[in-house]
Amino acid sequence: MIIDVVGAGSLGLLYGGKLQAAGECVRFWTRTSEQADQLKQNGITITQSDEETYVKPDEIQANPISQLTNHWNKKPGDWILLTVKQTHVEDFIEMMATLEGQQHIKIACYQNGLGHLEKLQAALPQTLLCSAITTEGAKRSGDQVYRAGSGETQLGWSNALATVNEIIIEEQQIFTLAKVLRQAGFDCTVSNEIDKLIYRKLLINAVINPLTAIWRIPNGELLHKIERVRMMRQLYDEALTVYRAMGVQLQGDLWEQIEGVCQATASNTSSMLADILHKRTTEVESINGSIIRMAKQFNLKVPTHEMLFHLIQGMQSEGVS
């Protein structure tokens, strides 16, 4: 199987490196030529507890993403793992729009927040779009990737993007991808309730990410002061009110799940905090911005989300020291 990993951040290198080590043909597509050259010179090292996976430089296929369509037209891949952030999805769409044979493209989307699936389907209507919801945690330092334990990965086809006849065919291909990911060492399953998982992840990100970005703390530190927990709870309660109005029903105690994520990823730097520290555009528009837009549809107020949304938007272009 040929798997194209678009985005060579921590998540892309984790999945691509493990898949390559398991014997799959992986092609990495990076933002710059320098990043591709670094991978081909140094290889990839994935460290987890006392286990280490090393992909040798001569086994690495890496090129800047600007060359993807040329390579694909000559030799199409089987799956694209789209691991770039929401802020780069439109760049990916613009590039893929010129690709030949779009009906053969299968994309597993790892983005946070909402809106990317609709954008991708509108621009690439003949592609198979699969959502990938994961609790995998990874940090990258150059060609080194540190895997923070083993999370879960769930794949699925959003009901909003398919007809009944399409689902049967496309789910079979999603099961094939799940099998390949399991063979590479990922706890991967196929879910027929992927929409609920998307909303669950959105809620978790909308509570954890902006607060860690504002306070510049790892995830676990949110639980260490009552003032922080109170702010978390305000974000949680506001989002849950919106979900109830929408008829979104999620299983289990969601507050306990949020606390559990903070504990399980205690030392992790959230993606939003990482973006702020590196002076990059954050995903607050697709995370807390999504909560705000859904609230407006039902004339609901979500003042805490709105406040943090504007604070993050005001910070992200300059970053913080």
Image (cartoon, rainbow, N blue to C red):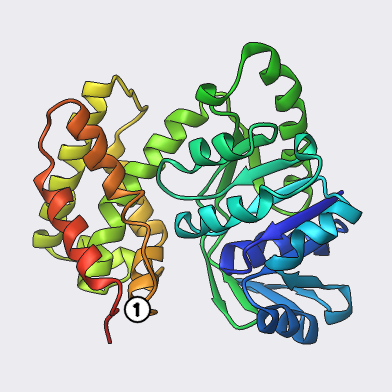
Please indicate whether residue 172 sits to the left or right of residue 59 in the image: left
Q: Amino acid at mark 1?
A: Leu
Q: Position of residue 166 (x, y in %)?
A: 69, 18
Looking at the picture, tell me which residue is in the foreground, 292 or 14: 292
In the picture, the quarter occupied by the C terminus is bottom left
Residue 26 in the image, given as x and y percentages of width and height: 81, 60
Residue 220 drawn above or below residue 55: above
Q: Name which residue lies at 58% across and 62% down.
A: 11
- Residue 293 lies left or right of residue 138; in this view the side is left
Instruction: Give the labeled residue for mark 1.
Output: 277
Q: What is the number of callouts on the image?
A: 1
Q: Is residue 82 left or right of residue 58?
A: left
* Image height of 312 relative to 89, above or below: below
Q: Position of residue 189 (x, y in %)?
A: 64, 36
Residue 17 visible in image: no
Quarter of the view holding residue 237: top left
| Nearer to the camera, 52 or 129 | 129
Image spot of residue 12 (x, y percent): 63, 62
Q: Residue at x 61, y 15 (%)?
A: 163
Q: Nearer the viewer, residue 256 or 85?
A: 85
